[in-house]
Amino acid sequence: MTDYLLELLQVLLGLGLAPGLVGFVRWLKARLQNRRGAPLWQPYFELRKLFHKEMVISNNASWLFHLAPVLVFASTVAVTFLIPLIIAPLPFDGVGDLLVVVYLLLLGTFFLALAGLDPGTAFGGMGASREMTVAAIAEPTIALAIFGLGLRAGSTNLGHIVTQTLANPSAAISPGHLLAFAALFIVMLAETGRLPVDNPATHLELTMIHEAMILEYSGRYLALIEWASWLKLLVFFTLLSNLFVPWGVATALTPLALAVSIGTLIVKLAVLAVAIALIETHVAKLRLFRVPELLGVSFVLALLAVTSSFLLR
């Protein structure tokens, strides 16, 4: 019972930290650009406002339009149950591994793209087409990058990968780990709609991807989609930090270990948030036809990571 309560605590922690993480990135970018910017807790205010606003729904929208926000949010929350956020191994490790995590992420992307097409607007169709182009390369890269870690650990279970890396610290600086980290970092930029792939701070029609699919949403539906996208950013940050640098992840059910794990997680998230803020401050958005080239580089890096892990294990 304690294990399942910890799973619930992990999910609640992820849901609570996700808006703050996005607010921290926005605040850092504002400071780096010599702007005052919104406070760190602004995303929490945005969620509260959206949950209380009335929804405006297109007459052309079908049941799929109403179902998509719930599925997108639920699939992202389900991923949070399966990743080693603060403790490893997890009680749900037996029912979910690398492949389940990848397919759950793809499930949300798929239904969001369908919802963008459903009202029949030009921008929704454009955004859905672009999102599928990105996902077609990004999702296999995620699987390959983490599979490179799984080759050394002997399992595709994320909790097992963490414990094996803790038992063998030298694996963290192996070529396979470093290549997989670089591949997953590039994919994270694409999957979460960050620069140079997408710009989360603009609604410019000719360049937006994620925002184009959700233009027709409002009220609590938009709140669920935004919360899910922020949680997805936290999920990718957690994969980057706890799979590749797992030190601090609790392996014992003691209050001290859990407190250290939560504190270490916050520090890791802050470091990655600083990296994202620096990148988005100094890098311009890529032209759309160049995005597959960048994702192709990430796929090659992931493939090299698998090859390196297979040859050097």
Image (cartoon, rainbow, N blue to C red):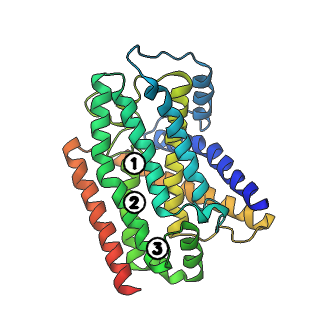
Residue picked out by circle 1: 191
Q: Position of residue 302 (x, y in %)?
A: 33, 67
Of the residues under marks 3 and 1, which one precedes in the sequence? 3
Q: Is residue 41 above or below residue 92?
A: above
Q: Residue at x 69, y 68 (%)?
A: 250
Q: In the rendered structure, which amino acid carries the disc numbered 2? A: Ile
Name the residue type under label 1.
Glu
Q: Which mark is residue 259?
A: none
Residue 201, image x and y in percent? 41, 34
Name the residue tied to disc 2: 142
Neighbour tally class for label 1: few under 14, some 14-19, many 20 plus, Cα within 10 Å = many
Residue displayed at 41% across by 36% down: 112
Tell me the element at label 2.
helix
**Quarter of the image holding residue 227?**
top right
Q: Which residue is mark 3?
A: 150
Residue found at the very far left of the displayed protein? 289
- Marks 2 and 1, the one that precedes in the sequence: 2
Q: Position of residue 95 (x, y in %)?
A: 58, 61
Q: Nearer the viewer, mark 3 or mark 1?
A: 3
